[in-house]
Amino acid sequence: MRIPSGCSKLERAIIIDRVKGMIFGAILGDSLGLATEGMSREQVQKAYSNGPIRFGMDDDQESAGVNFIRDTFRSLFDENDFGDDAEQQLLILFSIQENRGTFNYKDYATRLYNYSNRGMRGLDKQPLGIKATTKSVLSRPHFLESPHPTAIDVWRKEIDTRDDSGSLVRAAILGVPKFWDGTTVIQNSAECCRITHPDPRSVISSVIVSTIVARMLRGQDLEMEILDSSQPSPLPSPLLSKPNQLPLSSTKLPPTPTSTPPTPTSATTPTTKWTDSLETDRVLMSLVRAVIDANKRILTAPNTDPLFQTPETDANLMQEYFEQLIKTCYQEPLQLSPQLLHESHVFSCLGGASYVFTRVIPKGSETEYFKRLLMDIVMQGGHADANGSVAGALLGLRIGYGCLPSEWVVGLKRWEWLEDRVEEFCEML
């Protein structure tokens, strides 16, 4: 996985800083997201008012924010701990390391299965928060022998959970191995996604995130001609917009202790709209559009490329998915119904991440904007840990490890252990 000379416009030190920022950004997003996972916006408002939520080593002054609530679900986690979304990413990191810089989806499938039963080696904690689709696929008797066919079988039988965001949290790290080789990045991302989520919406979302990471590390497209020559203007947010536009879904908390988070259903009034006041970074938006355009055949021409195999055969439905993707990620005005959001959680997660990723961040304000953008995502409730993890990964990739809030990073539970593991991974670059 050693970076070849001339494959990126960035120096190796900058690439490593971005990779570390991406990994820790994802972990921070997952950890912070646990504060509102499974909550409606009304529940978030009641528990945290308008925030912010106190996290990491924020000082004890009242201005630092509101403490985590400790209800049935959240009491299962230690303070500043992370959940399965971060741990699934770490499993990929370990798999790549032990396979000498390459990704092997069968090796990862085995690690994921073992993790779901025994937790992660070295952490002395149970796996908490695994999403319904992933849990269902892992429980099938033939999963280890044939993970992809097993996932397709579950996909055919369990329609309601086909496209949850459980696989998207793994996508960012898969943009790192051989980031200079776009085909390898796409193959790794699609194969990893299909271990548990063969739905085409999940696959294209995963490929988009992985490809954005790879292109950012190559430094290409960042100097490309901006497709839209108009002045930048705020775009409607897929997470922070009006109630009838794209609210995150959520539900009541479980009455008894369980390692499974509450299942989101519906949402109401947003608690904050600071992010919606920010303008669009036109260069980064052009990058997102270019990545979507390059991979749209997953939905517009399914099964014409061996990289993009899907069990979905309804061409009209695939076209609807493509239109949903476009509206969710960058079309304005953005008007998607709550019912559509309920049916397409992965697009909601992707849309929220791409939205905060493409906001204008003033030079010198990276740390503060990271905190506020991520907090805005989390304060919407719903699938907050997954939404926070993917958004945190892209934001961390953008600003780099050196600009992450140190009080959050060192405040993470097991921070030193995480630092060692990530350093070992980056030594391979």
Image: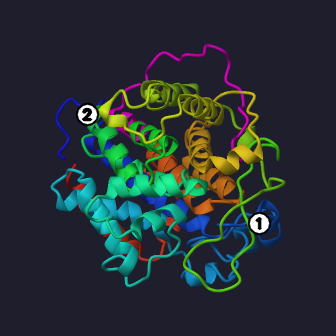
Q: Quadrant of residue 115?
A: bottom left
Tell whether label 2 touches label 1 (CB within 8 Å).
Answer: no
Is 202 on the left-hand or right-hand side of 428?
Answer: right
Callout 1: SS: helix
Dot 1 amino acid type: Val
What is the basis of the colouring in this image? rainbow
Q: Earlier in the sequence, mark 1 or mark 2?
A: 1
Is 313 on the left-hand or right-hand side of 10?
Answer: right
Range of residues picked out in magenta: 212-240
Callout 2: SS: loop
Q: Which mark is residue 388?
A: none
- Say which residue appears at 70% left-offset and 76% top-offset: 67
- Tell whether position 222 is magenta: yes
Q: Quadrant of residue 220?
A: top left
Residue marked by disc 2: 181
162 relative to 356, above or below = below
412 relative to 148, above or below = below
Q: Which mark is residue 44?
A: 1
Q: Position of residue 182 (x, y in %)?
A: 30, 33
- Tell whether position 59 is magenta: no
109 relative to 57, above or below = above
Q: Quadrant of residue 90?
A: bottom left
- Measured in 3D between alpha carbons, the distance from the residue under mark 1 to the one under mark 2, in whole angstroms, is 42 Å
Is 159 on the left-hand or right-hand side of 310?
Answer: right
Q: Nearer the viewer, residue 99 or 229?
A: 99
- Say which residue appears at 38% left-offset and 31% top-offset: 303
Mark 2: give few (<14), some (14-19) or many (20+) Cα within 10 Å: some
Q: Position of residue 384 (x, y in %)?
A: 62, 60
Q: Position of residue 213 (x, y in %)?
A: 40, 41
Q: Nearer the viewer, residue 361 or 192?
A: 192
- Say which residue appears at 57% left-offset and 45% top-offset: 353
Q: Position of residue 74 (x, y in %)?
A: 62, 78
